[in-house]
Amino acid sequence: QVQLVESGGGLVQAGGSLRLSCAANGGTFTDYRMGWFRQAPGKERDFVATISRSGGSTYYADSVKGRFTISRDNAKNTVYLQMNTLKPEDTAVYYCAADLGVVRSTRPDRYDYWGQGTQVTVSS
């Protein structure tokens, strides 16, 4: 079993940047494809980005493509989400998740472990 702990959220003005981190404890980090999701109040949890076990392959939601970058450091058991050119509509609780599956997925129910989330608020 792996425990995931996110950090790096906060309040930022529109156009600004934030970098989220997610540290994994327990298990073997390279067994997992990692993903980031977000959930705004009253809305469903939405896919943001995912990265392969090696870090060589990434995939993004259209709404963040070109602005967000997912990366991982397997030596540090950590996955990151660099968020640039932030918009008020990016405001949400951001969650990292670990997926044991073989096939890339954007569905939250395909992910096996979740962090507790970190709040990102973008002011206009």
Image: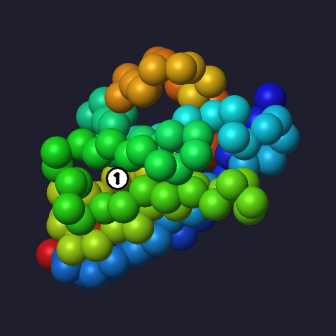
Q: Quadrant of the C terminus?
A: bottom left
Q: Quadrant of residue 12?
A: bottom left
Q: Quadrant of residue 101?
A: top right
Observer-nearest of 31 and 10: 31
Q: Is residue 48 above or below residue 21?
A: above
Q: Quadrant of residue 31?
A: top right
Q: Report the side of 76 relative to 115 (left or right).
A: right
Relative image position of residue 107 (x, y in whole percent): 38, 23
Q: Is residue 124 above or below residue 120?
A: below
Observer-nearest of 29 and 23: 29
Q: Is residue 72 above or below residue 27?
A: below
Observer-nearest of 16 and 52: 52
Amino acid type shown at disc 1: Ala
Residue at the right extreme? 26
Relative image position of residue 39 (x, y in whole percent): 36, 42
Residue that mark 1 sits on: 92
Q: Report the side of 74 relative to 69 (left or right).
A: right
Mark 1 surroundings: few (<14), some (14-19) or many (≥20) residues within 10 A: many
- For image coordinates 57% across by 57% down, the residue present is 72
Relative image position of residue 109 (x, y in whole percent): 47, 18
Q: Is residue 42 above or below residue 57?
A: above
Is residue 90 among what the camera can see?
A: yes
Observer-nearest of 77 and 54: 54
Is residue 23 among what the camera can see?
A: no
